[in-house]
Amino acid sequence: MLKVGSFLRNPFSFLFARSSAEEVVATYLLREHGRGRGVAEIVTDPYVQNRLTPEQTERMLERADIIHALGEQDIAAARQILSG
C-alpha cells in the first residue's frame, strides 16, 4: 500500500517503480552471469521469458546497476538478440 506522505513527496513515483518480477529476474541474471553464462543466452531462458515481457527485459538491461555488473558488450549482445 502506498503511504500518503511518500505519494505527496513524489506523486509520479509509480511511473518509475520496478516490479518484483523484474527484481527477481535481475537477481537471476546476475547469478547466472556469475556462473559464466552470457547475457544473450540468459535473456532467452524460459525462466526470464515467462516472467517478463520483452519491454520489461529491455528496461532491465538499461538499468545502470545491471550494465555496471555485466559489462556494456554483454548488454549490447543481449539487446541485439531481443530486437530481432
Image: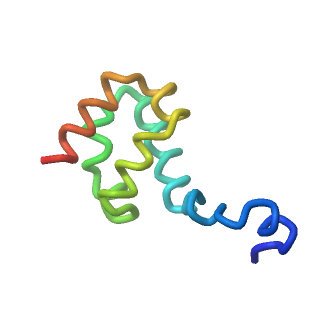
Count of residue discs: 0
* Residue drawn at 47 percent across, 46 percent down: 28
Question: What residue occupies the far bottom of the structure in this picture?
Answer: 1
Image position of 26 (left or right of 50): right
Image position of 38 (left or right of 4): left
Question: What residue occupies the far right of the structure in this picture?
Answer: 5
Colour scheme: rainbow
Residue 84's x, y, as percent? 12, 47
Residue 18's x, y, as percent? 56, 58
Give whichever of 47, 71 is nearer the camera: 71
Give whichever of 54, 8 is nearer the camera: 8
In the displayed structure, 7 sits above or below 25; it is: below
Image position of 15 (left or right of 28): right
Question: What residue occupies the far left of the structure in this picture?
Answer: 84
Give whichever of 3, 49 is nearer the camera: 3
* Residue drawn at 43 percent across, 27 percent down: 70
Q: Quadrant of residue 1?
A: bottom right
Give whichever of 36, 68 is nearer the camera: 68
Residue 58's x, y, as percent? 35, 48
Residue 65's x, y, as percent? 55, 33
In the displayed structure, 8 sits above or below 35; it is: below
Q: Quadrant of residue 14?
A: bottom right
* Residue drawn at 34 percent across, 32 percent down: 75
* Residue drawn at 38 percent across, 61 percent down: 52
